[in-house]
Image (cartoon, rainbow, N blue to C red):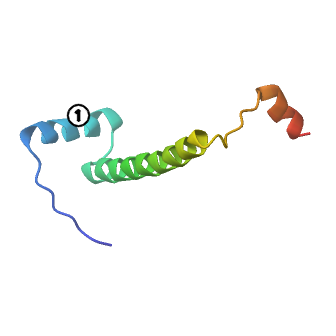
Amino acid sequence: MSILSVRLSKKEEQILSSLTSVLNLDRSTVVKHSIVELYEDYLDKIEIEKFEQKEQKGNVEFLSSDDILKSLK
C-alpha cells in the first residue's frame, strides 16, 4: 500500500469538503472513488473508440429488444 500526498487549491479543497460531507465519506475514500471513476471513464472511452471504428467500417449490427429476447430462449 502506498501513501500519496496531494496539494489542493482552495477550490479543490472546497469541492473535496463538499463531497465528503454530502457522501458521508472520508477524504481518502472520496479520492479513491474518484480515481476508480476516472479509470472507468478511460476504459469506456477505449470501448467507444473501438465501436466507432467498427461502425465506420460498416461492421456494426443493431438488434431490437425483441430479437435479443428471442435469442435468449
Q: Residues within 10 Å of mark 1 (few under 14, many from 20)?
A: few
**x, y percentage for residue 63?**
76, 32
Against 18, is 48 above or below?
A: below
Mark 1 falls on what kind of element? helix
Residue beneath the point at 34% across and 52% down: 35
Against 53, is 7 above or below?
A: below
**x, y percentage for residue 2?**
28, 71
Numbered label tally: 1
In this orientation, which residue lies closer to the viewer: 21 or 70? 70
Quarter of the image for the C terminus: give it: top right
Question: What's the amino acid at mark 1?
Answer: Ser
Q: Is residue 49 left or right of residue 15?
A: right
In this orientation, which residue lies closer to the viewer: 49 or 8? 49
Against 60, is 40 above or below?
A: below
Against 32, is 14 above or below?
A: above
In this orientation, which residue lies closer to the viewer: 41 or 53? 53
**x, y percentage for residue 45?**
45, 46
Residue beneath the point at 29% across and 50% down: 31
Q: Residue furthest left?
A: 10
Q: Residue furthest front?
A: 57
Residue beneath the point at 15% across and 57% down: 6
Residue at mark 1:
18
**x, y percentage for residue 56?**
56, 40
Q: Is residue 66 left or right of residue 12?
A: right
Quarter of the image for the N terminus: give it: bottom left
Residue beneath the point at 27% across and 37% down: 19
Q: Is residue 40 left or right of residue 32?
A: right
